[in-house]
Amino acid sequence: MKEKKPIMELSLFFPAYNEEENIEICIEKGRKAAEKYAEKWEILIIVYEGSIDRTKEIVREWEKKDRRIKLIIQPKERKGVGAAYQIGFEKAKYNTVFYCDSDNQFDLDEIKRFLPYIEEYDIIAGYRIDRQDPKGRIWTSRIYNFFLRQIIPIKERDVDCAFRLVKKKIFEKVKIVSTTGLMTAEMLAKARIAGYKITQVGVSHYPRLAGEARFEMPAGLNVPKPKVVLEILKEILKLRKEIKAFKAVHKYKPISRKKKGLTALYYSFRNTILIFWNAVLWRKCPVCHAAIQEKDHPEDLAQYGICTNPTCTWGKGK
């Protein structure tokens, strides 16, 4: 008797922009993972119309080999990685949708890490274990993640990690407006406000071996271009208003704090900065400066990790 696969129907999509050196390997690995874990599946490659290399031609060749692999053109009028994600969800025909970047920095077989949570959760957000990116990009991401947590209701530790499984049904209530990479944070925030269940799972991360990031400064600085930063800042300002209105519609009430007043606000701000500087950036205990062990599912920054010093109580609930 044929063994039943853990996922009945699965759509996988991969945005691509000038990824001719990576896209064939990405499709091969995606197809292998889909065959292994899903009864029915499709792979959508979302290629930006302005892509000038052979990415589109390579995908068309795969379309001829397997009708479950499809090329979707992202029009120039809808530019931005967030817009590519939106198009992927719009075109996906199955309710369970997995998306990932096409730069081969993830092991697609690690979809198996999501399997225990598929029935219970509406979004399974991957986070990168031992991220294999240049230091400039890692620091930029940590600062970006930190400040987003202060502005919108998200708890996830790796907001911009592009290894995620989403139930398409969330878009019955959640309307996405961001067209930049902010889209991933907007989806998490609005899904939480709307009452959908979210969990986090650690996944392996690998260096980029081919191609190059398109949104960074030249000369190996590994930080976003000023134009990209400005676009994201504009979207953050818009998103704050969106989130406020969305909270009102869904009568969202965050957990209130017990302490009030300027003194409580000062200590809260100070503690947040100490935790961010020590635990997030330097992986050190904010109390004794010993090494920390990161938690798999931190509910907020204060639960980010556990001090490895046996005499220290930070993060141990004592």
Image (cartoon, rainbow, N blue to C red):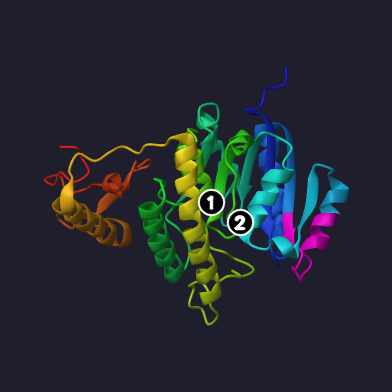
Find numbered disc 1 in the image and state the secondary structure of the residue it sits on. helix
Whether residue 61 sits left or right of residue 89 in the image: it is right
Q: Amino acid at mark 2?
A: Gly
Q: Position of residue 222 (x, y in %)?
A: 49, 73
The furthest residue to the bottom: 219
- First to last magenta residue range: 46-60
Label 2, label 1: how far apart the Cα atoms are: 7 Å
Tag 2 residue: 82
What count of labels does the image hold? 2
Residue drawn at x 26%, y 47% as measured from the top left? 302
Q: Is residue 50 magenta?
A: yes
Q: Is residue 105 magenta?
A: no
Q: Are marks 2 and 1 in contact (CB under 8 Å)?
A: yes
| Image height of 313 relative to 267, above or below | above
Q: Amino acid at mark 1?
A: Thr
Q: Position of residue 205 (x, y in %)?
A: 50, 54
| Image height of 211 relative to 7, above or below | below
Toward which corner of the image does residue 109 lie, by quadrant? top right
Along the viewing direction, whichever of 143 and 243 lies nearer the viewer: 243
The furthest residue to the right: 64
Q: Position of residue 85 (x, y in %)?
A: 64, 52
Query: Mark 1, residues whose alpha carbon is within 10 Å: few (<14), some, or many (≥20)?
Result: many
Whether residue 20 sits left or right of residue 236 in the image: it is right
Quarter occupied by the N terminus: top right
Find numbered disc 2 in the image and state the secondary structure of the residue it sits on. helix
Tag 1 residue: 184
Residue drawn at x 37%, y 36% as measured from the top left? 253
Along the viewing direction, whichever of 240 and 232 lies nearer the viewer: 240
Mark 2 or mark 1: which comes first in sequence? 2
